[in-house]
Amino acid sequence: MIFQSELDLKVARIDVLNETLKRFHLVSAGGEFLPPAPPGSHLTFLLNPRDGEVIKNSYSVVSPTLIRDHYEIVVRKAADSRGGSKFFHEDVKEGNLLKAKAPRSNFSVHSLARKSILIAGGIGITPIISLLDEIKRRRCKVELHVICGQSDRLALEALLADEALAGPNFYEGRNNCSIGKILAGQPLGTHLYICGPFNLMRHVQEVAHELGYPSSNVHIESFGATIGNAFNVKVEGLNKEISVGESESLLETLEREGIEAPFSCRGGACGQCVVRVVEGEVDHRDFFLSDEQRAAGNCMTPCVSRASGRALTIAIK
Amino acid sequence: MTQFKIDETFRDDYTFRNSDGAILRFPFPFEQDDYMYSFNVELHRKGGPTGAYENYFDIDEHYVSECRERALVLLQDPSRCLVLDHMESAEWDTLELIMECLASDYPEHFELHRDPDSWRWINRPLEIEHSFIFGDRSTLPCSPFEYITRQAQGDFLLQDHRNNNLYIDGGMVTSQADWSLEFDVGMSFIEWHAPVPLAHEMGVFESAVNYLMQMEYGIPVRRLNWTMTVNPRLDTSQENYPVWGPDRRTITRQNIGSKLHLRVELQAAWRLPRSNAILFSVRGYLASLDDISRVPKWARRLHRVIKNLHPEIADYKGISGYRDLVTEHMAQFDDGAPTSPGTQPDTKTLI
Amino acid sequence: MDAMISRPRYDRLSLGLGRTHLLIIQGSELPLGCLASSVTLDDFDEIWKVVSCSSVLPEPGSAEKQFRSANHLTIALCHRLSSETMGLRVYVVGEESFVWDINAQCRRFGLGNDEIHVFAPYHGARRVRCAHCRAYTTNCQNTIVTCDGCGATLLVRDHFSRFWNAYQGFQIDSEEPGVVPESVAFRS
């Protein structure tokens, strides 16, 4: 169903693409259809590599967006793994169950693009694959440029094999690829989608800017699902200090900790969840509080707003 | 299982009537005894103060008749369904969403069978059975958006999300409260709402557009809106204002109870997955003043709301001409007793 | 009548980042007050003008081209846009219906919000689309007009559609025939 926020997934198959890349086929543990995976989307997994430890890792869904009976993800074993990719590569076996949040995307296809240019750096190809699928369904002109290390080329080419794309352009290493050449002389209405290392994305943005691409035509996927900084919160009246992680809201943290908090829209619009701020600076991200209320600094909407610093003390009505 | 009234009319002889059950499930819009614009949004989850909130897309006893009325409007004015070319992906998203919800919420009326290559859709109340290929519009008799919204109650709008803004780039609008999709198509969300008084100064639409843009799919939201309509007429479009406008002058002390209707829109907003567009479903409900009067709490509250309504809002909603008559008529049901907070009827039987 | 938020407001033209800046003027001269103080005509790479004269020729290769009419210019512009590349910026000065016409053509070829800028120094007369019969009535000077299509007495609202390039008119005496408010001239 479409309205599931947490998914129980079963590993149906694992393909070894090369020494560092594996592809996982995931089906719903209950056998029902999965929510559609939007183009460019990722799944955030809640992993238990060891008892008592929970880590969150996000991986792009590379299967076509129309498919509802399974997801495919590709995981690269990172040298400096926090544990997530190591866990996937060494511990996850066919038949295992995994918990994940429903897929979310930071990319979307611009509906008025007359041509799309996709640029991927290395494993940054993964969110680009489902984006490409959606763009092709829209019968929009498209070019794909992939910059990668020599050792990954075969595996990444294999990932794209199903796409039957006329000539994806591969470049082995940044020095063999001129972004200026790719971007110059493109027709009006060209949109760029870039995913890869920060420096590559920055470079493409700069070149595009110089050539006169408006910023609304340049779309960047920053990897991961971070919402903001992590911070600690004391709740007045409760003898408890709770930690809000980078990828969760204060409201979610309160709920996780079993602290009752009112809410309605969960998007910073309705004001139902407003709490009193006793101490600490707030990074206000809502649409509800007035400028005066923000300036006074004694209330906040925990569904979207966060601490500017490292700590807050709040009181719930 | 819903028993459909299959031959109601919403024009000419106006045979539309609510059963007792339909009155009790009406989504009465007033939370308290006065009304002002606000950003009254909540998550659109199953369940709420009345039966109208039980499912994602509500199907009630008027379903078959409302679909027939929609078909009639489209015969007279095909541009009431209008979708710009770049919204095709959103059209398929809409079809998938509505079919999936109807089939799972009303299995006795609707079935969706998904084989890898082709989908089979069964709509028993409208006697439709059709196989098609998802994504291939040549396998449907009309565009995917038109196809599915001809089989759903209420109006539907598609908002494209691009350039950090929302644009009304499509819709099926045959039962609107005095506006024109055809004229407004392509406008930004703020331009589209330009004719609404007061709310712009309050910043309501700016908040709304920012809120909607951060919506995630799988987490729809809803709000209520309301107006009043003379006769149970669904097509109070701006296009046909010269046709229904004169009705506003026909309200008298004698006929107001049966002729004047409170019209409520249960508006839900849905992020669509592949297109990243936002779908608005605007599900309209009509209840005559006589219907409302059978629920004591609602009758008291309606009297107080109309009596104290801001004159600019009354003007915009087209109520000013007969507002005093409404207040006078509803006063007989208001004994001054306090009303409980919230919109639930507080009764299981009608008087 | 209060101004509605859909009615266009125009900012004096200033130059954004771009590879080529094309200025289009409806008329032989640029009216005063169209450019931001930091901008001069020399800042534009090309200037195209509608001069309303049957014998002018747009000279190839020249930075300033003259056209006989708005249609004459639009045909050349569409031809140009069909082979243009990213980095073009288009600026348009003229009557309201002219600038939104050019705007619509540019959008057809993929230009977006940041790539086209319009300025209508005089927008007193309005093009009106009837909500009922959908006919256009042009050059409307007052708030009450008779529809060219169905003959209805229309109130011209401040509600403007960039898609149709028109203001909206609706029959003001629908509820009570003949009851029509006083007609007021549009302020420019």
Image (cartoon, rainbow, N blue to C red):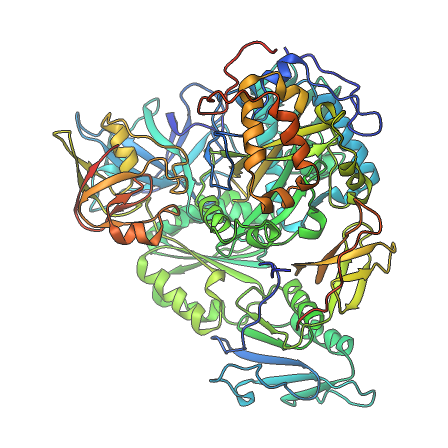
The residue lying at 42 percent from left, 67 percent from top is: A179
Q: Position of residue A36 (x, y in %)?
A: 49, 34
Left/right placement of residue C32 relative to residue B181 reads left
Question: In the displayed image of the protein, which residue is found farthest to the left?
Answer: A239
Residue sitting nearer the eye, A234 or B171: A234
- Residue B68 image offset from top left, x and y in percent: 78, 27
Q: State the residue in front, B190 or B275.
A: B190
Quick check: A153 above or below B157? below
Residue B190, image x and y in percent?
55, 53
Residue A81 in percent (x, y) is at 21, 43
Which residue sits at x=51%, y=49%? B205
- Above or below, comparing residue B345 to residue A307 in the picture: above
Looking at the picture, tell me which residue is in the foreground, B196 or A68: B196
Observer able to see residue B53: yes
The quarter of the rendered structure image containing the C terminus of chain A is top left
- The mark tally for this picture is 0
